[in-house]
Amino acid sequence: MNTSSATAPLLEINNLYVKLPAGAERSHAVEDVSYTLNNNEILCVVGESGSGKSITARAIMGILPAPHVHVDKGKIEFNGEELTTAKESRLREIRGGEISMIFQEPMTALNPVMTIGKQIDEVIRFHTKIKKRDRRERAIHLIASVHLPDPEQIISSYPHELSGGQRQRAMIAMALAMEPKILIADEPTTALDVTTQAQILKLIKELQQSHDTGVLFITHDFGVVADIADRVAVMQHGKIVEIGTTHQVLNNPQHPYTQSLMKAVPSLVPPAVRAISEQQELAVNKLTKTYSSGGGWFGFGAKARVVHAAQSVDISLHKGETLGVVGESGSGKSTLARCIVRLINAEEGSIVYNGVDLRPLNRAEMRPYRSKIQMVFQDPFASLNPRTKVGRIIADGPRILGADAADAERRAREMLNLVGLDDRAFDRFPHEFSGGQRQRIGIARALAMDPEILVADEPVSALDVSIQAQILQLLADIRERLQLSMIFITHDLRVAAQVCDRIAVMRLGNIVEMGPTSTLFKQAEHEYTRELLNAVPGKDWRPQASQV
């Protein structure tokens, strides 16, 4: 680990306050925040959503949504230059040129109608006067430096043509176009699978060292912190509550809030094995699903691209069991889940629920079984109707199946109480809730149908560790109380270790390994499973606060 430089810091924030508009939950998003960043140092800023991490970063970049949100007091000095009073023309020179930012969601941060090459070229063209041919060569070199294959093809591609990991690498290339002195990375690995996450972290570390760059890394993942940070600052409600070296903060946390965050980090050591019923509730046999795209107009021209999302998949689920399905993005996990709940149709195989094969059933024949297998989606905001109140969203399912309005409303209120939300939630809209609360609403909607099997597709992938712990505990409590069986899809092996009784590992549409969680974590047989386990961030770190 690096130690702080004896020279003047690259970035110095002193007593920063960022004002929120009238009517907000608190007067300031950031209050009295002070920290420094040195050359060739990685400072990780951690904390829950709403703690002020990203607002501080945006204040450094001068991209706060002014005038409603603005710097109220304090200083931000970059190489001795005060940024809070700098003119917009100077800030434009600094942004991208001397301070660059990698945003959390590259798909929304990248321009969807411009190729990757043009977007990198735009940055270079704004800050230099070099010729077009030289700019193209630099763009290709940048794409190659972030280890993307076939750079010439990548610069001609649009964002939607790249995978999530490739888009994130392209954004890193864009951020590094002018070799900035400071790189701000705002949750750059959230919701990425563990192998892609490990590659991105390794890449940022390499680039930081080769360019002598100061990196401000915003995250809620303490495994990531353990792997890359030199120092750590912990934020809560807009304030710094603890700051120190990585060793100090991770291995001897002093503040109760830091300790509570540590306790919420799932362990990689699976708990004691639960007794599972021998009754088989669901059996998926030889399930096959393919997708095809391209092929030109009316099938002429370019060759169609065929993706085998599920290839002769066999899994079983016992009464009261939680079966985990893990693997990288594109492995077929979500396709398998959607086939099981019949949101999409598989071409071959069987989905046997309590002796009935659901795969060949038409819509009318499937109707009696819809309530028995319900799904909790990865993104609750996208899966909840933004124009419909929460009570109606939850009550619609029972109403469609024949319950009268009064009974459906009563059931909806019961489910809201079951997932820890009060009656006031009934008449509110989805956007009025936090991410964790929206996920609880999604769970309540599924439970309102009185299912026997719950299919949870990445239900905690983008949540803070403390909210994640609450949702996982909620699912565990519901499983025990209602004797639910669960198929739990995740790319987070820490979560899988704590939640799942058995795990099926998927790769390129195939189940490559399956077995009890404790056995698989101790003695993985397939090379791909071992690769996933080795890629877990902070795998050698054990939270000490769990013993506090």
Image (cartoon, rainbow, N blue to C red):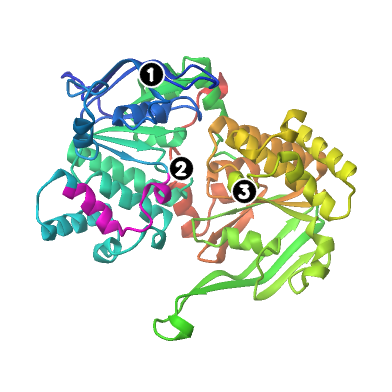
Q: Is residue 271 visible?
A: no
> Sequence order check: which comes first, mark 1 or mark 3?
1
Q: Nearer the viewer, residue 304 or 469?
A: 304
Residue depth check, mark 1 versus mark 3: number of the one nearer the observer: 1
Q: Please determine whether, in this image, residue 185 is positioned above or below residue 119.
A: above
Give the percent coordinates (x, y) of residue 97: 19, 39
The three-letter code of the residue at mark 2 reads Thr
Q: Is residue 121 magenta?
A: yes
Q: Residue at x 86, y 38 (%)?
A: 410
Q: Nearer the viewer, residue 34 or 498?
A: 34
In front: mark 2 or mark 1? 2
Disc number lying in front (2 or 3):
2
Residue range highlighted in magenta = 105-125
> Crowdedness of circle 2 by 10 Å Cα count: few (<14), some, many (20+)?
some
Horizontal side, residue 455 vs residue 257: left or right: right
- Residue flagged by tag 3: what amino acid is it? Thr
Q: Are marks 2 and 1 in contact (CB under 8 Å)?
A: no
Find the distance from the CA under tag 2 to the CA under tag 3. 24 Å
Q: Position of residue 14 (x, y in %)?
A: 30, 15
The extreme left residue here reads: 130
Seen in the image, is 496 located left or right of residue 145? right
Read off the residue under disc 3. 517
In the figure, residue 151 lies in which quadrant?
A: bottom left
Would you name the residue on which mark 1 appears?
243
Is disc 3 placed on a helix, strand or loop? helix
Q: Residues within 10 Å of mark 1 (few under 14, many from 20)?
A: many
Residue that label 2 marks: 190
Q: Are marks 2 and 3 in contact (CB under 8 Å)?
A: no
